[in-house]
Image (tube, rainbow, N blue to C red):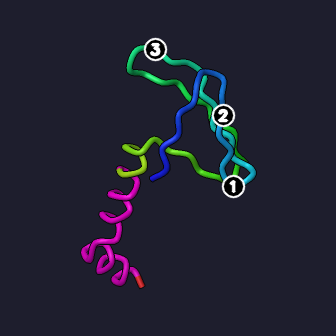
Amino acid sequence: MLALSRKKNEALVVNNDIEITILDIRGDQVKIGISAPKEVPIYRKEIYLQIQEANQDAMNTENLEALKELF
């Protein structure tokens, strides 16, 4: 993991087309802004993990067997 220090209104650039800007710092909370192309999905990690879990659940063998029976 790369760890960088940034101050309010300073930014990082990732892969030439994603910009992450520090918008505000209050206590232990940091507000960031992300500018990226529309085709780049951006999720909070807890939401991303929920999506991954739902995808795994959808691929369980019971669902595959039910799908096979449709054909």
Say which element carries label 3.
Answer: strand
Callout 3, which amino acid? Arg
Residue 11 numbered mark, or none: 2
Q: Between residues 69 and 55, which one lies in front from this camera angle?
A: 55
| Residue drawn where x is 66% and y is 28% of the image | 10
Callout 2, which amino acid? Ala
**Count of picture labels:** 3
Residue 51 on the magenta span: yes
Q: Between residues 65 and 50, which one lies in front from this camera angle?
A: 50
Residue 65 on the magenta span: yes
Tell me how far mark 1 sits from mark 2, CA to CA.
13 Å
Q: Where residue 65 sits: x, y (%)? A: 29, 80
Q: Residue beneath label 3, please?
A: 26
Magenta span: 50-70
| 3 and 2 marks in contact (CB < 8 Å) | no
Residue 15 numbered mark, or none: 1
Say which element carries label 1.
Answer: loop
Magenta portion: prevailing SS class: helix
